[in-house]
Image: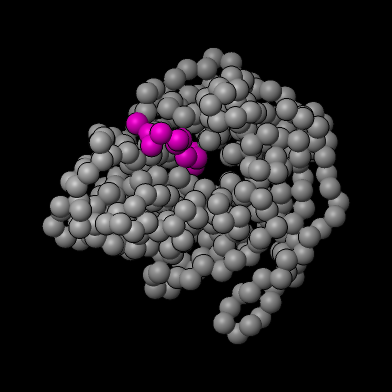
Amino acid sequence: MNRLLGVIAALVLLAVSCGSDGSVGAYSLTVLVDGLDGPTQLAITDDAWFVAHLNGSEGDGSGQVLRLDPDDLRAAPVVVLDGLEKPTGVAVFAGELWVMEQRRLTRSSLDGSDRRVVVADMAYNGRSQGTLTVDGDRLLFDTSGTKRFPPGPGGSPVEISGALWAVDGDGVITNVAWGFKHAYAHAVSADGRLWTTEISDGSFDGAPATDELVAVSEGVDHGWPACVGDNRAVEDAGVADPCTGVPRSQAVFGPGATPTGLAVSPWDPSRLFVALWVDATIVEVDTSGAAPAAPVVIATELSRPQHLVVDGLRLLVTDHAAGTIVVIERRE
């Protein structure tokens, strides 16, 4: 891994369509950190940034969590944890460092010592789990969904897969909601609503499912695999009225768009930003009106935008393919 970090001074200005009136706003993108190898999630505190990266191929088991100095991003990072299996999530919660790997959730001191397993042998979709999100006195994580094999009509989710969970500082785990293929990224808006992206890859009744953004109704089945996309009933599931009571999508994205990042806009709390990994774009979704809302593209100059985190009046993005951390700022 090239561990050199740098600041690139050049700004890339993006013209952004902000509404049906044709008005145009401008955002600037600046690379703050480079030299990373497959960065996934970034967690920030006042005196430290923690970034997880694969540090190799997905199956190498060489993932790391690095500690960066936000006051000197040119300084070499400190390796806090090493030898991780596909780390997709990192968070600072209850005074400790929490990490989501392919099949386990761990916690440790901020320097990586005293590490212990919170959940082991987690159900997953064969690829990964998602991100970690601090929500007050709880930490949110998901178990990605998988059906029984061989697949076929009437297939049901493997037990405890396809669910959104919360853990408190004492390690007590509760089920928040279920019925997701992959509730990958999460955010809490100013009005207290909990949001998640849904990566719904797969074919149902011969048609691919769309990815989506949905407001989570706690304690409710969100439909997958009998109800996909914006409440499309799956006939092959053999379930009567599977979408009854299922929340509608606030936005839908094309099949395979892969929404891996989610954040509340630092400039307008009624809007959410979503990073679409495969589409290589960041979009804005209005949450103040009826669902579904049409996503508006705000950035296209990224290779594989993965995670979004708000830092004051700016938005930080990990670019998985470029190995960078990028800041997006609004130009008034």
Measuring 74% from the left and 56% from the top, which residue is drawn there?
29
Q: Position of residue 56 (x, y in %)?
A: 63, 28
Determine the image quadrant of residue 166: top left
Q: Position of residue 26 (x, y in %)?
A: 72, 69
Measuring 77% from the left and 53% from the top, which residue is drawn there?
30
Q: Is residue 98 visible?
A: no
Determine the image quadrant of residue 27: bottom right
Q: Position of residue 314 (x, y in %)?
A: 68, 55
Establish if 273 lies above or below 101: below
Q: Report whether 309 appears left or right of 132.
A: right
Magenta span includes 160: no
Q: Main secondary structure of the magenta part?
A: loop
Measuring 85% from the left and 55% from the top, which residue is drawn there?
10
Q: Position of residue 264 (x, y in %)?
A: 54, 57
Q: Quadrant of the C terminus?
A: bottom right
The residue segment tinted magenta is 123-139
Measuring 66% from the left and 81% from the top, which residue is drawn there?
23
